[in-house]
Image: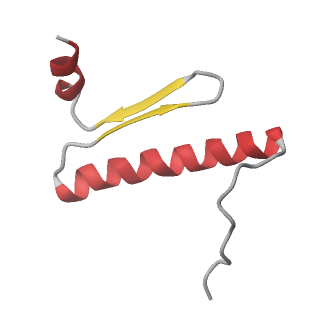
Amino acid sequence: MGRGKIVIRRIDDSTSRQVTFSKRRTGLLKKAKELAILCDAEVGVVIFSSTDKLYDFASSRQIWEKEMD
């Protein structure tokens, strides 16, 4: 039996919103890493939180180094 569908809209409660962000951020970064390993792909993910924190993942740091030069 699958999970129930959720309505995609902004979460009003700030605590619940932060918990959801943290869990989904972790899941997204894990999927990006898995995609890079399984498919031998160059993957990059950049996430900015509502508090302006930066979270990133790059399967090869050369991606970022080339962009920054």
Instruction: Choose between 32 and 66: the one closer to the eye.
Output: 66
Left or right of residue 13: residue 20: left
- Residue 17 lies in what quarter of the image? top right
Across the whole image, how many numbered discs are drawn on residues?
Answer: 0
Q: Residue furthest front?
A: 9
Left or right of residue 41: residue 13: right
What quarter of the picture does the C terminus occupy? top left
> Which residue is painted at 34% across and 47% down in the image?
33
> Which residue is painted at 40% across and 54% down in the image?
31
Residue 39: % across, % down = 19, 58
Residue 48: % across, % down = 52, 29
> Which residue is painted at 26% across and 38% down in the image?
59
Left or right of residue 37: residue 28: right
Residue 12: % across, % down = 81, 46
Instruction: Choose between 10 and 29: the one closer to the eye.
Output: 10
Residue 63's place in the image compared with 9, above or below, is above
What quarter of the picture does the N terminus occupy? bottom right
Q: Residue furthest top?
A: 69
* Snapshot colouring: secondary structure
> Which residue is painted at 19% across and 28% down in the image?
63
Residue 56: % across, % down = 41, 31
